[in-house]
Every structure is written in C-alpha cells, then in structure tokens.
Image: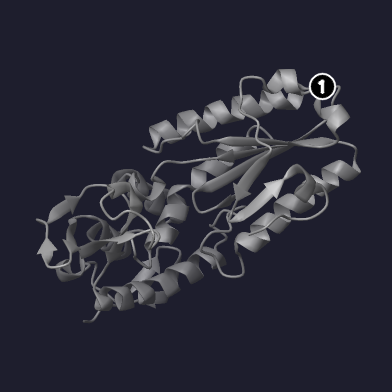
Amino acid sequence: MKFYVDISKHTNRRRFKGGGVFPASFKTAVVKPLLKKSNLDPNIFNNYRPVSNLPFLSKILEKLVFNQVNDFLIANNILEKCQSGFRTNHSTETALLKILNDIRCNLDNNELTVLVLLDLTAAFDTVDHHILLDRLKNLVGLSGTVLNWFISYLIDQHFFVSMDTCSSETHKIKCGVPQGSILGPTLFNLYMLPLGDVIRRHGISFHSYADDTQLYIAVSPDDTGPIDVLFNCILDIKTWMAGNFLQLNQDKTEILLIGPEGQKEKLLPKLKNFKLSQSVKNLGVFLTLSSVLFHTSKI
C-alpha cells in the first residue's frame, strides 16, 4: 500500500504512508470479555473486562503514522505539558513525583494542600468524533490528505463480541477512540487539550495522566479564598466536560486535605459539602496523610 503525503500544512519534510484512506478491513475489532480476576464469579457480568483486539496489520500501519505524528506534536510543542499519559519520558512515576514535590514545597512554606482527584466515567468511549476532528484541524493544524486519513480512520469503525465459540452481530462504533489501538491514547490526549486552559484560567495547579486529572492548591488556614477558586474551577471543568460529552463522576471524585491536624481543623467547614478521604489510590499508589508527609504507602 503506497501512501505519501505531508504530515501537515506546517511542514513539507515530514511524510507518512497511506492515501488519505484507512482500509475498511482494518476497522473491525473483536471484543473478548475476560475475567478481571480468576477467582471471580463468571456468572456476574460486572466481573468481566472487555478486551478489544484489532487486526495485526492495522497496528503496523497505525505505528507508522503514530511515529511521525508524535514527532510533529513534539517538534511543535502541541502536547499538554502537564499531561504524562502515553508520552515518551513520562509515566505515572513522573506525575506522582511532580505532585508530591509540590505538596511538600507547600508544607515547607507552612501551607496546607487541597488535592482533588477527578474521576471520569468511560472517558475513552465517549469521545465525540466531530469535536476530535475539529481539534486535529484547528489545534493541531492537520489538513488536506492527512486530515482526511484521520476522518477515514475514525468513521465506520465496528466491533463484535466473541466468547468461546459464540459471536455477536457486528455493531457500528459511533463515538470514542478505538480501544486497543496505537493512535487511540494520543488522540484522546489531543481531545483533552483545551482542559488545561480551562484550569489555568483559575490559576490552579494540576497534572494529568490520560483521563486521571488532579487539581491541587496551597492554602493558608487563615485565608480560605483559594478554596472558593478551586470550587469555581471544578464547576467550569464540569461544564466543559458536559459540552465535550465527557462525564465527571462527582460521587467518585476524592479530596485529600494535607497538612498538620491543628491547621486542618480551620478548613473543614469550608469543605463540608465534599467527601474528604483519609486515603486515596492515586495512579496505582495508595496515599495517606502520613505517607504524603513522610513516605508513600504500598502500591
């Protein structure tokens, strides 16, 4: 298959292979439900995790495109600097180190930290294709044949469920990034690009790993103004997510108040409408108040 087009209107040296069309035969995923743990009851549907399998050749083509698109994104400084998910030289460890270092700097300045862990519901599955393509065109700068290739890549994706010797009918995927794909995580990061600007308008510190976003502020016990700013930021985030077909799960959003016990008491009335946690699971690591102050808890 021959394919030779400019990666974007900004450069005539970066090229990748394909003809503005992603092959239809690469667009059908086989979804196989697998038990989350071997000791779980196989008769309960919630005990299964859907695993999406795509054609091997489709992943080879996606990898070729990903390598050149990723080079372009890095060269043009397009990626969100506070996003550590699915990026070279970034990981859950680098994200946690950044957040914990900022929290400990706040403690050194005799300030408390309010840490908010936002929870999104099935974020990768609710990505709107029209909005995503608008991001690729207007924020990333793709156009012409390259943009057409991504349009072809996203539309008319299908899946069917296979279990043992049984298979379901084939269904069309109308939203979301292709699960199990090479390009899916990067496309999700690009879909989330405007969120950083929403948060920065409020002057709130944040860091993200894929769909896990953490907000945190330094606050003095005698000045609760930053908490009001944080609440307004969360409201704007919720509004932005609703407009982008993302759902913020407020019931699972967690807040950790970090600092000396005597100083924390002054802030509790301001946080009475939120469920404060004594321990949170943050990017695979359990954090408690003592672990943040002294050491991390178990992974």
Q: Is residue 158 visible?
A: yes
Please determine whether, in this image, residue 187 is positioned above or below residue 264. Answer: below
Q: Residue at x 55, y 35 (%)?
A: 253
Depth order, front residue of 80/142: 80
Identified at 37% across, 60% down, the residue is 184
Q: Position of residue 75 (x, y in %)?
A: 55, 67
Quarter of the image that includes the N terminus:
bottom left
Name the spot of residue 278 as percent of width and height, x first: 69, 38
At label 1, the amino acid type is Lys
Query: Splitting the image into 4 quarters, where does residue 50 fall?
Result: bottom left
Along the line of sight, which residue is nearer the eye, 215 or 148? 215
Q: Is residue 220 visible?
A: no
The percent coordinates of residue 122 (x first, y second) are 38, 45
In the depicted structure, whether residue 269 falls above or below residue 186: above
Which element type, helix, strand or loop, lies under badge 1? Answer: loop
Determine crowd level at label 1: few under 14, some 14-19, many 20+ residues with C-alpha closer than 10 A.
some
Furthest residue to the left? Answer: 169
Horizontal side, residue 100 vs residue 276: left or right: right
Quadrant where the C terminus sits is bottom right
Q: Which residue is mark 1?
A: 266
Residue at the image position 41 percent from the left and 36 percent from the top? 247
